[in-house]
Image (cartoon, rainbow, N blue to C red):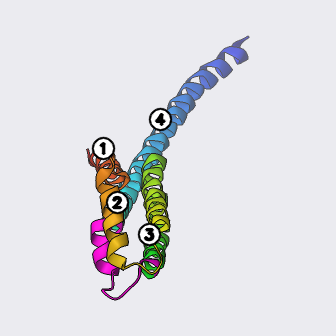
């Protein structure tokens, strides 16, 4: 019986010391892990925020370049026919869009879909207006028809996409 009492007097305090040390060390390592994760997140934010902002800037620039008012000024040739302008516009829109495809990984799905929809609606308008005008007609006739169609839209998809991106950037930065 005396041996049992001596063993308990040794084991119980040792177990308490071990448990205290174990939980203290465990808490220390947990806190250190959280601190490292926080630092890693902070460092990642320092890297990714500028990249994301640049993606938003590039997409808004893309949309501004696809805006028919600026697109037609850049593309139009005084001696071109409506058929040539139609072809040049489609090539320019697709090239601009393809040049910025990689930006979709930095923005939300709704924002990317708004950008994509703006491009698709613009191509549709260009094609529809080109089908109403003779291929040999002056390019200015097609330009005017496209601009009139865009102005007549109640919700310009390019402006909707720009607004969507701006709202997302505002939420992202706040």
* Residue 132 % position (x, y): 46, 64
Give the camera-side residue of 95 and 135: 135
Q: Badge 2 is on which residue?
A: 56
The N terminus sits in image quarter: top right
Which residue is identified by label 4? 24
Q: What are the residue bounds of the magenta stretch?
A: 65-83
Question: Residue drawn 45% across and 56% down?
Answer: 121
As helix, strand or loop, the secondary structure at mark 4 comes to helix
Residue 140, image quadrant:
bottom left
- Look at mark 3 in the image and give the residue it sits on: 133
Residue furthest top as drawn = 1
Residue that numbered label 1 is attached to:
171
Q: Position of residue 99 (x, y in %)?
A: 46, 74
Q: Is residue 54 visible?
A: no
Instruction: Classify residue 100 by image quadrant.
Output: bottom left
**Horizontal and vertical percent for residue 74?**
30, 79
Compare residues 84 and 132 and report the one nearer the observer: 132
Tell me if 36 is positioned left or right of 156 in this view. right
The CA span between labels 4 and 3 is: 81 Å
N-terminal label among 4 and 1 = 4
Q: Nearer the viewer, mark 4 or mark 3?
A: 3
């Amino acid at each position: 019986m005396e041996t049992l009492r001596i063993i308990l007097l040794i084991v119980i305090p040792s177990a308490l010391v071990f448990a205290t040390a174990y939980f203290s060390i465990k808490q220390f390592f947990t806190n250190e892990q959280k601190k490292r994760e926080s630092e890693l997140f902070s460092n990642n934010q320092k890297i990714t925020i500028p990249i994301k902002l640049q993606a938003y800037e590039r997409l808004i620039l893309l949309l501004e370049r696809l805006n028919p008012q600026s697109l037609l000024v850049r593309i139009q040739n005084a001696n071109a026919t409506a058929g040539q302008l139609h072809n040049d516009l489609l090539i320019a829109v697709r090239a601009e869009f393809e040049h910025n495809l990689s930006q979709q990984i930095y923005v939300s799905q709704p924002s990317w879909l708004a950008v994509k929809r703006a491009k698709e609606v613009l191509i549709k308008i260009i094609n529809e207006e080109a089908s109403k005008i003779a291929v040999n007609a002056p390019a200015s006739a097609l330009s005017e028809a496209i601009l009139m169609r865009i102005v007549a839209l109640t919700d310009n998809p390019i402006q909707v996409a720009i607004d969507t991106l701006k709202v997302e950037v505002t939420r992202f930065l706040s």
